Structure formats: structure tokens, C-alpha cells
Image: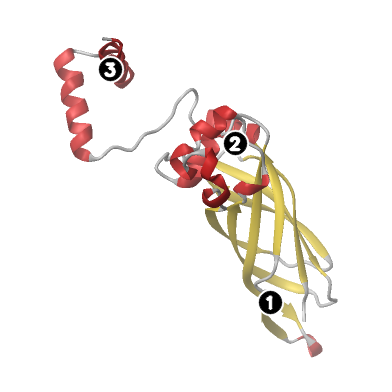
Amino acid sequence: MPDLDFAIEGAEVLEYAAVPSLLFRLRIENLGEEPIRSVGLDTQIRIAATQRHYDETEQMRLLELFGEPGRWGTTLRSLLWTHTVLQVPPFSGSTVVDMPVACTYDLEVAGSKYFHALQNGEVPLEFLFSGTVFYTGEGGRLQVARIPWDREARFRLPVRVWKEMMEHYFPNSAWLRLRRDAFDRLYDYKVRRGLPTWEAAVEALLSASEQEVER
């Protein structure tokens, strides 16, 4: 029976995709001897948030996720980032395949909040693998086996790669999702003030709020 081992060898920005995407280089090695016909691979990717240091600025930006730094001993925890599915073509021995991972810039999503809060360094990731292996058994017959649930790999993604990806797809931009009623109020404010852009509307509101605080 195949005995698959997994490792992430690198990551880069996928330049041409419908949504922001990273391309991870995944090495798969069969420690057994059977030729692999294909692998239907399911991957859960988690952020191992406890496995890096955070400076004061990052700690403040992570308040929404983990609360006050003094409580991080109990609140700092790993986060589910995303899932991805990959069909691996035939190989013998070992192979390296591209694993594209679609990313969202929706700042209501915990993973996006986490990435956005970081200034530099690396993001510790855990890849948890499952799925189905199709291989050639005795007499050339097609055999099927499940990937054991303990198969995983670790990788430290440079924060700069995430920032490069978002800058590539959304140059000098960020995205916010608003409830429809909040959007309608903002739209009415923009029209009443004759403001040309959404940025101008937000800037006007922020300036008014800052002036109110200073009084």
C-alpha cells in the first residue's frame, strides 16, 4: 500500500487568476513501491498563530482576533485559513506539483484579518492532508486507499509574499463589506455632500469624528 509523505518547498504569487491566489510547491513522495495512478488530495490549511512573535503594532492590530495581549496565554490559538482540493497526476517515487490556493481580502474573515495585521516576518502554516490514492496493485490492478489523517506539512510563508499578492491584484486598495443599510446611509451622505469618491466620503467622516474628539 502507498505510504505518502508531503512537504511544501516554496510559495509565490499566482500572477494570472480570477481571484488573488498563491501557488505552493508541494512535494509528494511515495515511501512504498507502487506506481501512483492519481491522488485526489484534500488539504486544510491552518495558521499556527502561537508559533511566531508579534511586535507592539501587530499586537494592537490583532486585538479584534485575540483580545488584549495580557490574555494571549488563553486566547491566542491556531486559525483555520482555507481548504483546497487538488488532483495529482500519475507518478512513481516522488513528484512536485503546483497547489494553487485562492485567497480573500474580505476583512470580515479571520484569516484575512490576521494577514493584514502583520508587518513583516513569516506566517507559520500547517497543511493537513486527506483524500484518496489510486495506485497499481498486484497484477496491474487498480487499487484505492485513503490517505491517513496524520499526514501534514509545515511551512513558514513570508508576509511579503502575501502583501505582494494583494498589491498585485488590488493595487493600493483594500476592501470592506458593509450591511446594505450602512451602505445606503454612506451612499446618501456621499450624494448629499457632493463628494466625488468613496474615499472622499470616508475621509470626510473621519475628519468630522476626529474634530469631535478634539473638542
Nearest the camera: 52 or 44?
A: 52
- On the image, numbered disc 3 is attached to which residue? 209
Horizontal and vertical percent position of residue 155:
71, 49
Crowd band around label 1 with a 10 angstrom C-alpha radius: few (<14), some (14–19), many (20+): some
Which of the two discs, 1 and 3, labels the residue nearer the N terminus? 1
Where residue 211 appears, as percent x and y from the top left, is 28, 11
Q: What residue do we see at 77% from left, 85% from top?
A: 137
Side (left or right) of 104 relative to 132: left
Kind of residue at badge 3? Ser
Quadrant in the picture for the C terminus: top left
Residue 112 x %, y %? 49, 41
Which element is circle 1 on?
A: strand
Examine the rendered structure and indicate whether residue 30 appears above or below residue 171: below
Q: Which numbered disc, 3 or 2, marks the residue that appears first in the sequence?
A: 2
Q: CA distance from mark 1 to mark 3?
A: 61 Å
Q: CA distance from mark 2 to mark 1?
A: 34 Å
CA gap between label 3 and label 2 equals 32 Å
Give the amino acid at mark 1. Phe
* Coordinates of residue 138 in the picture (x, y in percent): 80, 89
Tag 2: amino acid: Trp
Q: Residue at x 63, y 35 (%)?
A: 159
- Residue furthest toward the bottom? 139
Q: What mark, if any, has residue 134 been given in the picture?
A: 1
- Residue designated by label 2: 162
